[in-house]
């Protein structure tokens, strides 16, 4: 029994050192290393109703990726609105067990405080996410129209499409 004590003690100490050194553990399993992750490219748009600018209307951007992030802006006199690029620090993309998608939802509220969708899409974190950037940079959205679903082909893989639900001209 005595001859097993020292090797057992060495193994226990080695395991404790390995798993209590956060950086080693984080690098091995990528659970704790956080990196910048882009939830949304910048958004530039114009809100219309029957082709007329809607001034002074609140527009919201809700982004979901585990947590929910909501931004709010008010349209200018010519109906323009914009949201900055949204970047978060997270360990999720490097986590091999994470398979969550990013949900982008841009909307306004009607007179009954009911959401009126301007733009909605579900993205998987590394799936051709730059494809939609050009659309988000020039949204012309007429909320008098019912939203439609458009299939947009990924710019570097035409077989992959994004289903975008929107009132905007694409």
Image: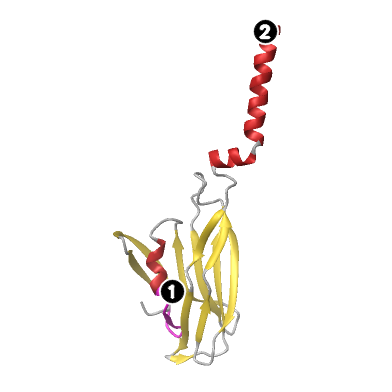
Residue that carries the numbered disc 1 in the rendered image? 136
The residue shown at (50%, 60%) is 102
Rendering coords of residue 55 (x, y %): 54, 90
Q: Nearer the viewer, residue 155 or 48?
A: 155
Rendered image quadrant of residue 13:
top right
Magenta stretch: includes residue 142: yes
Return the x and y of residue 169 as percentages of the image width and height.
37, 80
Task: Classify 10 Å Cα crowding around label 1: few (below 14), some (14-19), many (20 and above).
Answer: some
The image quarter in which residue 162 lies: bottom left
Q: 127 left or right of 98? A: left
Identify which residue, 51 or 83, lies in the foreground.
Answer: 83
**From the viewer's perspective, is 74 left or right of 96?**
right
Q: Is any atom of residue 69 visible in this view?
A: yes
Which mark is nearer the camera, 1 or 2? 2
Which quarter of the figure is the C terminus placed in? Answer: bottom left
Which residue occupies 57% across, 44% down?
31
Q: Is residue 18 left or right of residue 86?
A: right
Magenta segment: does it hold 68?
A: no
| Residue at left offset 57%, top offset 54% | 90
**On screen, residue 89 above or below 33:** below
Residue nearest the viewer, comparing 109 with 23:
23
Q: Quadrant of residue 152?
A: bottom left
Q: Which residues are magenta?
A: 135-148
**Residue 1 seen in this snapshot:** no
Earlier along the polypeptide chain: callout 1 or callout 2?
2
- Residue pointed to by mark 2: 3
Question: Where is residue 57 drawn, in percent x and y?
Answer: 56, 86
Q: What SS does tag 2 mark? A: helix
Q: Residue 35, relative to residue 143: is it above or below?
A: above
> Mark 1: which secondary structure?
helix
Q: Nearer the viewer, residue 4 or 156?
A: 4
Residue 117 percent across, percent down from the top left: 49, 75
């Amino acid at each position: 029994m005595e001859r097993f004590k020292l090797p057992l003690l060495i193994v226990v100490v080695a395991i404790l050192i390995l798993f209590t050194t956060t950086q080693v553990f984080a690098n091995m399993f990528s659970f704790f290393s956080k990196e910048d992750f882009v939830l949304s490219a910048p958004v530039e748009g114009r809100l219309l109703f029957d082709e007329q600018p809607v001034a002074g209307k609140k527009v919201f951007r809700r982004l979901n990726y585990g947590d929910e992030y909501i931004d709010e802006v008010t349209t200018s006199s010519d109906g323009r609105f914009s949201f900055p690029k949204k970047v978060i620090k997270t360990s999720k993309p490097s986590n091999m067990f994470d398979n969550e998608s990013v949900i982008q939802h841009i909307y306004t509220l009607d007179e009954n405080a009911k959401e009126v969708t301007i733009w909605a899409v579900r993205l998987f974190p590394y799936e051709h996410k730059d494809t939609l950037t050009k659309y988000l940079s020039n949204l012309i959205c007429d909320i008098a129209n019912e939203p439609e679903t458009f299939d947009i082909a990924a710019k570097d893989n035409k077989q992959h499409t994004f289903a975008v639900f929107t009132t905007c001209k694409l």
